[in-house]
Amino acid sequence: MIMPLTIRPRAEDVEGQPILRPLPSAKCRSVGPFVFFDHMLQTSYKAGQGMNIRQHPHIGLSTLTYLFEGKLQHKDSLGSDQIVDAGDVSWMTAGSAIAHVERTPETLLGSDFIMHGLQVWLASPQSHEQGPGHYSHHPAHTLPVSDNLGIKIRMIAGSGFCLQSPVPTLSPTLYAELNLQTATTLLIPTEHEERALYLLSGEAQLDGEPLEPHSLVVLPAGEEMTLFADSDCHAVLFGGAPLDGPRRMNWNFVSSDPARIDEARRRWAAGDWPTVPGESERIELP
């Protein structure tokens, strides 16, 4: 039996929002199409304060934002302007060049609020790395849910547990939110080749071994595993088919071809990039 790989995340700060980032790491560069995983830690903001991630570029990936608490405003160079509520999916495919902004909506800044959520990046298949970008918003009520015997599963993206999300993923994908009541047990099937589990809160065991809160556990391929809740717990399970070749990641750019990343860096630095309507501030190339 192959033992699961446990990854302890590193702490980062994104425009004032504290995060934990377990992926990518030196031990694991991807799980299925997922190449980047940010846990935006539960953070209390005072009135007038909030997130403001200025205009920045992407290529070769899709971003997926999913909030447990709070709201975000998404704007991009396609002209999208969307308020994203807790439980919604905000899905943006970059194609060959896109820019976007993520900030706390004005309507939320008038009072104290709490922010908590996840943002992940999924590498596009090589056949979709170039071409036009795309944005779609999926309200919480459109995501399929299974709620039985103390176990609630919401399929954020992709498929699993006989659920299929409407989010237009580009390759076989699994991204599920799990809520388990105390003393319940969930069998994690092998329907996806690559899988990982991230424990957001609570106490749980995986095949009898305790899980560390805020740890990412990469599950062995082809092995069913059992998740047992020692207390009410909250987790996400994600993965999918392996990538169709290695990916290079540099700043906000992901590609199977290093030359495309070099070109994207040159274009962003030169200001030769699609812009978000109504936005002038931007994050400069590091």
Image (cartoon, rainbow, N blue to C red):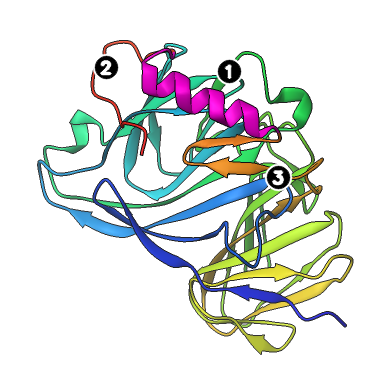
> On screen, 81 above or below 91?
above
Q: Is residue 261 magenta?
A: yes
Range shown magenta: 257-273
SS for dot 3: loop
Q: Residues within 10 Å of mark 1 (few under 14, many from 20)?
A: many
Name the image quarter holding the C terminus.
Answer: top left
Asked if residue 50 can be seen in this view, the reply is yes
Which residue shows up at 33% across the image and 39% down it?
Answer: 71
The answer to the question of whether label 3 and label 1 lie on touching residues, with beta carbons closer than 8 A, is no
In terms of image quadrants, where is residue 205? bottom right
> On screen, 58 above or below 185?
above
The residue under label 1 is 133
Q: Residue 53 location in percent, x, y? A: 30, 36
SS for dot 1: loop
Looking at the picture, which amino acid does disc 2 mark? Glu
Q: Residue 99 location in percent, x, y? A: 43, 22
The answer to the question of whether label 1 and label 2 lie on touching residues, with beta carbons closer than 8 A, is no
Camera-side residue: 130 or 105?
Answer: 130
Q: Which of the marked residues, 3 or 2, is nearer the chain's N terminus?
A: 3
Q: Residues within 10 Å of mark 3 (few under 14, many from 20)?
A: many
Q: Residue 184 location in percent, x, y? A: 66, 77
Looking at the picture, which amino acid does disc 1 mark? Gly
The residue under label 2 is 279
Q: Residues within 10 Å of mark 2 (few under 14, many from 20)?
A: some
Locate residue 113 relative to residue 183 in the image: left or right.
Answer: left
Separation of residues labelled 3 and 2 (CA atoms): 31 Å
The residue under label 3 is 33
In terms of image quadrants, where is residue 172? top right
